[in-house]
Amino acid sequence: MTSTLLPRRRIGTSDLETSALSLGSWHIFDRMDFADAVAMVRYALDRGVNLFDVGVYGLPGKPPVFTDVLWGSIMRAVGVPRDAYLASVKLWIEGFGEEGFKPQLDNAFLRTGLDRADLVILGDLRRDDVRLEDLVDDLAGLTDAGLIRAWGVNNWSASNIRELRRIAAERGVAGPQIAQLKYSLARRSIPDGEPFAELFGAGFSMQSSDVLEGGILAGRTAPTREIGRDPGSVREAIVATVPGIVELAEKLGTTAAQLAVAFTLSHPANVTTLVGATRLEQVEQNIGALDLLERVGADELRSLVEPFWVDRGIVDPEGP
């Protein structure tokens, strides 16, 4: 069992400090025994995990989901004080209307038992009829009301993030502090590209997500649950790299999953890596990735995994 206590890093220029690993909720807690989930979350908190990603992930016409409701019950069962952790809540551009994000936020609070969100992450920008100025103004209002403390975006382009930051600066309000980006051994083109390097150099932060490609990069090449989108249509090519990843992990005395998590921690702008776990042993392995990174070294690790970079030259570094 690992004894590593996770370090904390500041999110952008906000007053939030996040643990190097954060725990997600998408398709997680509704696949677990409740007592096991409580034990897993308690262990994660004891080892220093302080950021939890919570979202209302149901879609019209799909079966109802309850993983966020379960998360709220888990946190109450653990008995952790509210000021001992950070809650990151997803907000969806598709649902942004005349009342702004407030209805979505109220619904998230109802389902989770939260009374505020430390961080909100705006989902993918798929609408062209929403003014970025309106988003910035609405989020500034939610901040002033004490309902959120900071905000960021999920898989937005570098140019749209720069525009958000420009608008916020003109208005004298806080802009986006962090981007949740797909980042893994296989998907590196956007976070490792020049457009985002410029943002990171200006103090912007990253949260790595989809780091195991739905379990594929952990060696489970035929996942049975829903996994994220496939930018560049490279998933088959990713599956083809798995034997090499497993072989390298064995040479390093680790597992493919731990190697994949350790890689994300090597990015200088990555303040936290978002992981999903349905077993306590997986949390232990994820935390142990910090020991692997320290043992091998960031530069050496990044050199060793270079052959597994699948989306190079396929996905535009600017982002979607």
Image (spheres, rainbow, N blue to C red):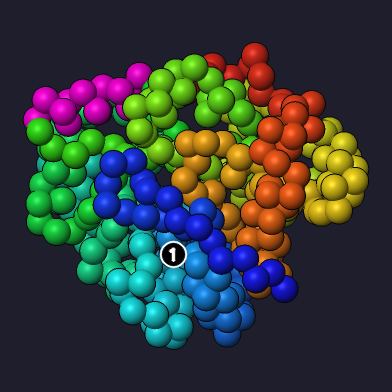
Query: Which SS type dominates the magenta stretch?
Result: helix
- Identified at 49% across, 65% down, the residue is 49
User: Residue 156 appears in which quarter of the rendering?
Assistant: top left
Front in this rendered view, residue 97 or 218: 218
248 magenta-colored? no
Q: Please provide percent x and percent y for residue 25.
A: 50, 61
Image point (40%, 85%), residue name: 79
Q: Which residues are magenta?
A: 159-171
Between 238 and 287, the one nearer to me in the picture: 287
Question: Which of the 4 quarters of the picture holds residue 140?
Answer: top left
177 with respect to 3 (left or right): left
Q: Is residue 187 visible?
A: yes
Left or right for 275, reference 235: left
Q: Is residue 190 rendered to the left or right of residue 257?
A: left
Q: Is residue 103 visible?
A: no
Q: Quadrant of the N terminus?
A: bottom right
Question: Helix, strand, or loop for circle 1?
Answer: loop
* Amino acid beneath label 1: Asn
- Residue 154 at what x, y percent from top left? 41, 39
Q: Residue 48, percent across and down?
A: 50, 67
Residue with the most extreme top position: 313
Residue on which disc 1 sits: 50
User: Above or below — where is 115 with respect to 261?
Assistant: below
Circle 1: is it few (<14), some (14-19), or many (20+) Cα within 10 Å?
many
Question: Where residue 148 sits in the image (x, y, percent)?
Answer: 22, 55
Residue displayed at 44% across by 71% down: 71
Q: Judge whether residue 166 is colored magenta.
A: yes
